Image (cartoon, rainbow, N blue to C red):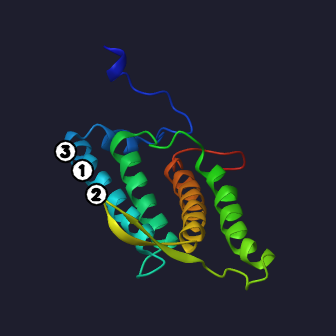
Amino acid sequence: MSPRHKKPAPGPTTGNSPATALLANDPILRTVSRAVFALVLLFAFLLLWRGHNAPGGGFIAGLMTVCALILHRIATGTSALRVDPIRLVPWGLALAFVTGLVPYLLGRPFLKSAFGYITTPLTGEFEWASALLFDFGVYLAVVGGSLAIAYALIDVDPQERVEGDQ
C-alpha cells in the first residue's frame, strides 16, 4: 500500500469513531464534498466581505465556514486546519476588542467605524470600512469556538467505557 493511501493514525485531527471511518471511504461523498467545500467557503467569504454593509458578517460567515470544515472532516477523516481551532478564539477576541478600542483611544465612541473609498483600475471604486476588522475578529472567534465544540463531539465514541460504568 502506498504512503498516500495509508489510513491516518488516530489523533486530534482524525476521526476515531467507526461511523467517521465508514464515511471517509465513500468515494461519492469525497468527490462531492470538494466542490461543496469550495462553494461554501466562497459564500462565507462573500458574507464576511459584505457584512458591514449588508446582511451577513463575521458570525454567519464563521458558521458557514464551520459547516464547510465539518463536511471536510466527515468526508476525508482529517481536519482541513493545521492548527487547533481553539487557538483562533483569543486571536479573534483580541482583534475585535482592539478594533473597538482604537476609536475610543482617539476620542471617538467605542466601536466607531471609519470608512472611505479606494479606486483601483481592476475593481473600480469600492468602500473600505474598519468594521471589516471587527467582523474578522468575530469570524475567528466563531470558527475557533464552534469547531472546537464540533470536533469534541465528533470524537465521542459511544462504545467507550470509562471508570465507574457498569
State the residue in front, 88 or 155: 88
State the residue in front, 58 or 107: 107
Q: Is residue 10 left or right of residue 43?
A: right
> As drawn, which residue projects farthest toward the top?
1
Q: Is residue 29 left or right of residue 75?
A: left
Query: How far apart are the two marked residues, 1 and 3, measured between alpha carbons?
Result: 12 Å
Question: Which residue is denoted by mark 2 in the rendering?
Answer: 39
The residue shown at (70%, 57%) is 90
User: Label 3's element?
Assistant: helix
The residue shown at (41%, 46%) is 73
Eye-nearest disc, 3 or 2: 2
Residue 60: image x %, image y %? 46, 72
Residue 111: image x %, image y %? 67, 80
The three-letter code of the residue at mark 1 reads Ala
Cβ atoms at labels 3 and 2 below 8 Å apart: no
Image quadrant for the N terminus?
A: top left
